[in-house]
Each structure stands twice: as structure tokens, then as C-alpha cells.
Amino acid sequence: MDNRKTRILTGITTSGTPHLGNYVGAIRPAIAASRADDAESFYFLADLHSLIKAQDPVRTQRSTLEIAASWLACGLDPERVWFYRQSDIPEISELTWYLTCVAGKGILNRAHAYKAAVDKNRAEGEDDDAGITAGLFMYPVLMGADILIFNADQVPVGRDQIQHIEMARDFGQRFNHIYGREYFALPEALIDEEVATLSGLDGRKMSKSYNNTIPLFAPRDQLKKLVFSMLTDSRAPGEPKDTEGSPLFQLYKVFASAGETAAFARAYADGIGWGDAKQQVFEIVDREIAPLRERYEALMARPQDIEMILRDGAKRLRERYAMPFIAELRAAVGLRDLSDANAMAAADDEGSPVETPVPTFKQYREADGKFYFKLMEGDRLLLTSIGFDSPRDAGRRVAAMKEGALEGNADFRLADGVGSDEVNAALARFVAAQLAHE
Ligand code: TRP
């Protein structure tokens, strides 16, 4: 790849209204990162994804507006980062189809969100796929297109999203292999272990699903009311209080300097009354949020400005990257000008520049009576399985692997000096060879 800047891409789910937990855990760190000079950053509103869950058009529109206004109010600068709406980049939808046609269905079967929905159906005695849309099933492919269309190198995500990034790598790798060139850079998940999670009003993790949140831009008096409704214990003023496990203290800490936090801890030890403590927490939160709230309200009053910012971002981004790249991909798959015979011949020459052998699976039995398999690339050993009790068990695992991806299963061991990316590439070649025979 050329020596371009590292590309960092962040997808923002457009559902609900952001709360303080989102701000502290995601928005604030992401905006701080967006100020780095050594990266090219992409921030987009994943509104196509939102349709999988939310099918009320008025709420979809409202939520997209609120989330865009929130990120802008918190300091995202559309002059220095790419800020856009997924649905404004039709090339993402087009790429979704090209990836759909190389993605292994078996890999999607194993996506956590889909599997959880199937498990729930089974537990309730329903059909496996009852009430599950193809949209939920295809979620990872659309997400792969979000990432691959801009050849993002790094994708900051929570742990629950790591599997999606692995899938994006897999789809990209398969496409590269089938069409014989490194069209796509393979993205990496960037996991920030540091980010704070906040407790909500009731002491559990602040989350929309627990209904215990403090909206990020609650008006001042409502913010105060909510802070004053936070869970405390029954210790009276004058009794020393524990900072450990106190949701109030935790909230104070993420908005305060180290010195302020130390002073507040002393106040706890000295037996500050809960009313006074709440007043201090409210003030420290409001100190940071008040100016953002003011900007947020000004932005919300001018939705046409936000619309313009988003459209402008998408327009520039399409011209710069998405349109030329999709044209290249369209040609790569063979959706071409029929009169252009040169392209036909030239592209044929380009195909499969290096001939790496198609890998093979070998099943065998060891002296311990167990059944094993190994994956070979020519004479080279890539991995060996653990011992299975029956040839059927071993065969089943082989069949799963033949669908494409390795995944974090513990029932095999990579051979010395072999990386999982290499095995994934070999599996992609295996799948491509199967497809070519069909
Ligand atoms: N799935 C992500 C989430 O739930 C949102 C998202 C959609 C995303 N497309 C993306 C994140 C691409 C990173 C890259 O949080």
C-alpha cells in the first residue's frame, strides 16, 4: 500500500438519544482521537444499520438528527475529519452486494447477534428463524462494506464488535483472492481497554435497556433532578462514606481533575452528607456539559445546517474515494463496458498473480484412538486439530472450517510460524477453488 496516513473509521449507531455513559465511554474519547494529526478519520452515522431494529420512520429521522447534533456539539470538526451519513454513500450499498456474493453463509450463521436470536427462538420453542429478518443476518456484510469501501486500517470498537471486524477481514480477503489483487486493506479492531463505563441511576451499568440513564443533554434542572435521584446508601451526614462502588463518586471522577477527585474522596471520608455530595456532582458534570448543551440546542434549532454538513461531507468523500473505488471494483468483478476488449484481456492477465496451492484437509487416526485432521498447503503443515472421539465429530469441524473462517475455536493448534491470517487466507483460497468448480 502507498504511504498514506492511517485511516481510522468509527461507525455511530443512530438509535436512541445519547446519555452520559455514551459520552464518557464513546463520544468524548472518539472526539479526542479525531484531533490526532497522524490519522485520517472517518465518522459516520450508521443509519442503514438502524433500520434493522427501528422501523418507525419518524424516530429514525429524529434519532439521526439528535446523534449528528450531539457529535457536532461535542466538538467533532467536519473540516478536519470525514463526517457523513451511511445512506448518503450509495457505493456502500453497492459494495455490500459484491461482498454478499463472496461472504460464506456459514460464517454469518455464526455471528453472535444472529446466533443469540436463534438461541432465544429455540429456548421459546419457536422455529429457529422466527421473526429474524435477513437484515439482521446480513448486518456484518453491510458493516464490512462500511469499512472496506474506505480501506480503513483501524476500527475502534467495543469487545462485542470484534467478531464483525474479523468478518470484514474475511470478506475482504476472499474478494482479494477471488479477483486476484489486493483491492482491500484488511482492517484491525482497536480496543480501548481504558474507557470508563458509568453506572446509571440504580447503580447498574448505565444503559438504555435498564432505563437508568442520564440523557447527555438533559436541561439543567432535569440533570440536577436526575443526579439527585442517584442511588446512595443510608449513611447520615457525618458518617464516613465509601468511594468504592459509589455511582456518585464515579460520575464525579470522570468529570473532575485529579486534584478535585482527591478532595472529593476526602470529603467522603469526612462524612459529607449525600445532599451536598449530589450538589457537587451535579456542578462538576454541568461545568463540562453546559457549553456543549448550548451548542446542541443551537444546532437542533437549525436542522438544515446539519443536513448541509452531512451532505457536503458525503459529496466530497464520494468524489475523493468512494466513486473511483467502486468503479475499480465494478471492473474487477466484470461489470464492464462491453465494447472495451482491452480491459477484458488486460484484466485476464492480472488474475491470480501468485499461484499458491489450494490447501487440503487430511483426516487420520492416531495411536490414542482419537480422530484428527490437519490442514496442509502443499507439503506445508498449517494446523492440526485436537483429537475427536468420532470421525463424525472431526468431519463436522472440517466442514465448518471449509466454509471459510477459523474463528477463535480452541479445537486446533496452528503449526509453528503460521499465523491465523495466513490460515484464513488459505481457507479463502479453498472456498474460492470450490466455487470455481461449481
Ligand atoms: N455495529 C456498530 C455498533 O453497533 C456500528 C457500526 C456500523 C460500525 N458500521 C460500522 C462500527 C463500521 C465500526 C465500523 O456499534
Image: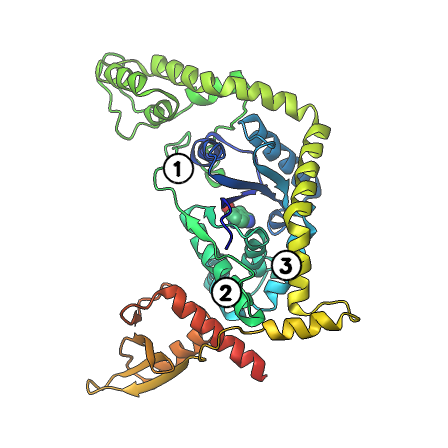
Residue 205: numbered disc: 1
Q: What residue is shown with label 3?
A: 95
Residue 173: numbered disc: 2
Which sits earlier in the primary sequence, circle 3 or circle 2? 3
Q: Tell me the crowding category of disc 2: few under 14, some 14 to 19, or many 20 or more residues within 10 angstroms, Cα based.
A: many
Which sits earlier in the primary sequence, circle 1 or circle 2? 2
Q: Is residue 153 above or below residue 379?
A: above
Residue 403: numbered disc: none
Q: Is residue 62 above or below residue 96?
A: above
Q: Is residue 263 visible?
A: yes
Q: Label 2, secondary structure: give it.
A: helix
Q: Tell me the crowding category of disc 3: few under 14, some 14 to 19, or many 20 or more residues within 10 angstroms, Cα based.
A: many
Q: Label 3, secondary structure: give it.
A: helix
In space, the residues marked 3 and 2 are separated at their CA atoms by: 14 Å
Q: Residue at x 34, y 85 (%)?
A: 363
Query: Of residues 151 and 299, which is closer to you in this image?
Result: 151
| Amino acid marked by disc 2 | Gln
In space, the residues marked 1 and 2 are separated at their CA atoms by: 37 Å
Query: Of residues 295 and 322, which is closer to you in this image?
Result: 322
| Amino acid marked by disc 3 | Leu
